[in-house]
Amino acid sequence: AQKVTQAQTEISVVEKEDVTLDCVYETRDTTYYLFWYKQPPSGELVFLIRRNSFDEQNEISGRYSWNFQKSTSSFNFTITASQVVDSAVYFCALSEAITGNQFYFGTGTSLTVIP
Amino acid sequence: DADVTQTPRNRITKTGKRIMLECSQTKGHDRMYWYRQDPGLGLRLIYYSFDVKDINKGEISDGYSVSRQAQAKFSLSLESAIPNQTALYFCATSDGDSLNTEAFFGQGTRLTVV
């Protein structure tokens, strides 16, 4: 079973629109961590955010915000006023204490921001 | 210099050839991982190592082997490359002393098997 599901394969938005990338995870552990990575066209993986299972506070960093809801096992990522430079593949990942901190990645969401 | 370095960055090899992808890190992390990325499939774990004497198979280890030569070095080998091993390969590290840490990735190795 897939531990991290990113149901949106591809999304296209027009510049300045807001966009939300969905991430649903599955775990039986009480201690776990969630991550978002960005992979721009150049191919490297850029770490964006880490959140542990005990901290459900939402986080905002500039145009980026993250909504963590344990009740729905979701960790969604919103980009406000999207820009062309946001075009990338975004990966959500899960790390569980019970499996020794292996990282499980979703299949990624490819975001295209149209100028 | 990058904290996690992969060599080569690009490689084209023929079916049946043996090839080694190398990874070195300067972060001092105990944990190292090899992933492959295929379009639509995300990153899938091939092998991981939590310290020099620890090697574990991941989700898709068939056709691959690894060697942890030192804390800083973790190599991935394809003993007899086949075309469906064409992919983007990533090495990653993480700090084993802390669960609250992200994985740090190398720049990736684009491997093409013809």
Image (cartoon, rainbow, N blue to C red):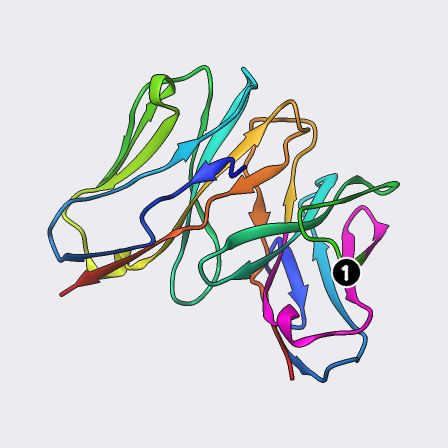
Q: Nearer the viewer, residue A40 or B43?
A: B43
Query: In the displayed structure, does residue B35 sit left or right of residue A87?
Result: right
Task: Report in which chain the residue with disc 1 lies.
Answer: B
Is B96 placed above or below B7 here? above
Is B12 placed above or below A85 here? below
Query: In the displayed structure, does residue B54 sit left or right of residue B44?
Result: right
Image quadrant containing the N terminus of chain A: top right
| Callout 1 crowding tier (Cα within 10 Å): few <14, some 14–19, many ≥20 | some
Is A18 placed above or below A52 here? below
Query: At x 59% / y 51%, what residue is drawn?
Result: B44
- Disc 1, SS: loop
The stretch of residues the image draws in magenta is B66-91
Is B113 placed above or below A43 here? below
Image quadrant containing the C terminus of chain A: bottom left
Query: At x 28% / y 59%, what residue is drawn?
Result: A87
Query: At x 44% / y 31%, what residue is drawn?
Result: A25
Q: Nearer the viewer, residue A30 or A79?
A: A30
Q: Position of residue B33 (x, y in %)?
A: 68, 48
Q: How many marks?
A: 1
Q: Position of residue A19 (x, y in %)?
A: 19, 45
Q: Quadrant of residue A75?
A: top left
Q: Nearer the viewer, residue B4 or A26?
A: A26
Q: Quadrant of residue B107?
A: bottom right
Q: Position of residue B95 (x, y in %)?
A: 66, 35
Q: Position of residue A65 (x, y in %)?
A: 26, 34
Callout 1 amino acid? Tyr
Query: In the displayed structure, does residue A76 sit left or right of residue A96?
Result: left
Q: Which residue is mark 1?
A: B64
Query: In the displayed structure, does residue A105 sit left or right of residue B20?
Result: left
